[in-house]
Image (tube, grey):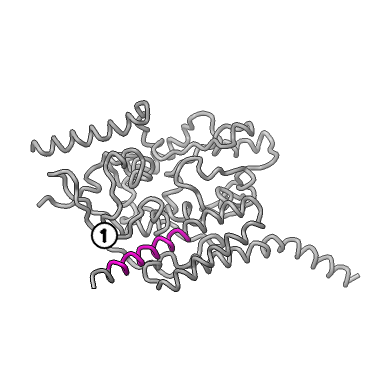
Amino acid sequence: MTIRFFIAAFIVLCLFLAPALAESPIKAEFDAACAKTDDAMNLSVAELNELIERCSRLRKSLEKEDETVRKVYLKRIDMCENLYRFVLEAKARQQKKGEAAK
Amino acid sequence: MKKSYLVLLLLLVGAGMAWAQGGMKKKKPLPYEFGTVTLNNYSEHAGMPPAVFDHWVHRKHFTCRLCHVDIGFGMTAGSTKIKAADNMKGYYCGTCHNGQSEFGKGKLFASCAKEYTREDYKVCVNCHRVDRSEAREDAFYDFAQGMPRETFGNGINWEKAEEMGKIKLTDYLEGVSVKKAKLKTQQDFSLTSKVEGMPDIIFSHKKHTVWSGCELCHPDIFVGVKKGATKYSMVEIFDGKYCGVCHGKVAFPNTDCQRCHSAPVQ
């Protein structure tokens, strides 16, 4: 009787936790990829490229998610990735100008 | 003195041209209507009145960044295409309006439901409003009474309100926002006015980064990192581009010249 109770309780717990657990990898990966937007200007070209790559991977993994999660996170990734790309391009332009000046 | 009149005339002509491009004269919103957004992507199809969103109710508690970056609301009305199902899953309005989130002395009402009773409908009309709500208007004027005044927009100087500690804006929502290192304070900078006699612009980069973050403006609204890299005119701003994405619709309007053109004339 006790074992049955624990099994039932475990199943119920899993059912409750499932949505949260299923969502957390996306949120965790998004957090890791987009935590540096406020510091983007101080990142190196290599760091920016790595974060852009991470955003692209995250975008692909979103294809399996439901419509709402996809819509919300695609918009958030767009903003974050665009900022990284924008800073990267600005750095490249600056570097070109510096080289031309030499 | 004559120069000032000329500048004023030019601005009025610019504003007039921008409005004229819209096809008809826009009605100046009343203070409590300023910043109100009507969303009707799916509401009427679902048999509900459009959702009416009051910016002032939310901006007295939260930064622009929290909703437009972390929650993912677009910057133009209807661009997010929010569905009732999205809210019910705990996204967009449902991030906070889920019937569970504590706010002030109570819980925030849940946004959207598949089925609702006549009693529940009273909650629906918090957003899906048919008529103007006198209670809302009163609530606005009650709130505005204690706030520092300004002439344009909704008559509240939000910047001063924050400086004076009248409002304390939340910028982080557990489970939604990204934990970030503290943002480095940005330096304000000046932009040269294109019109002779018009004071130069002092752009509050500090205030804008704290309220909006970096990614809300760059690169979608301003494509340049370097000062002066994005070229724009007052006509474009009055047309809702660049500064006009927020200023004029939600933030203080562009007719409040001296809020931006504030540098002393040499």
Magenta segment main secondary structure = helix
Residue ID at (51%, 61%): B177
Residue ID at (52%, 67%): A53
Crowd class of label 1 (few under 14; some 14 to 19; many from 20; radius 10 Å): few
Q: Is residue B27 above or below residue B113?
A: above
Give, as a single range, the part of the protein colored magenta: A81-97
Q: Quadrant of the N terminus of chain B?
A: top left
Residue B230 image point, x, y percent: 30, 52
Instruction: Report the residue marked by disc 1.
Output: B188
Q: Tell me if A63 is positioned left or right of A80 in this view.
A: right
Residue A32 image point, x, y percent: 53, 69
Q: Tell me if B74 is positioned left or right of B147 in this view.
A: right
Residue B47 occupies which quadrant of the picture? top right
Residue B202 image point, x, y percent: 23, 54
B213 or B237: nearer the viewer? B237
The three-letter code of the residue at mark 1 reads: Asp
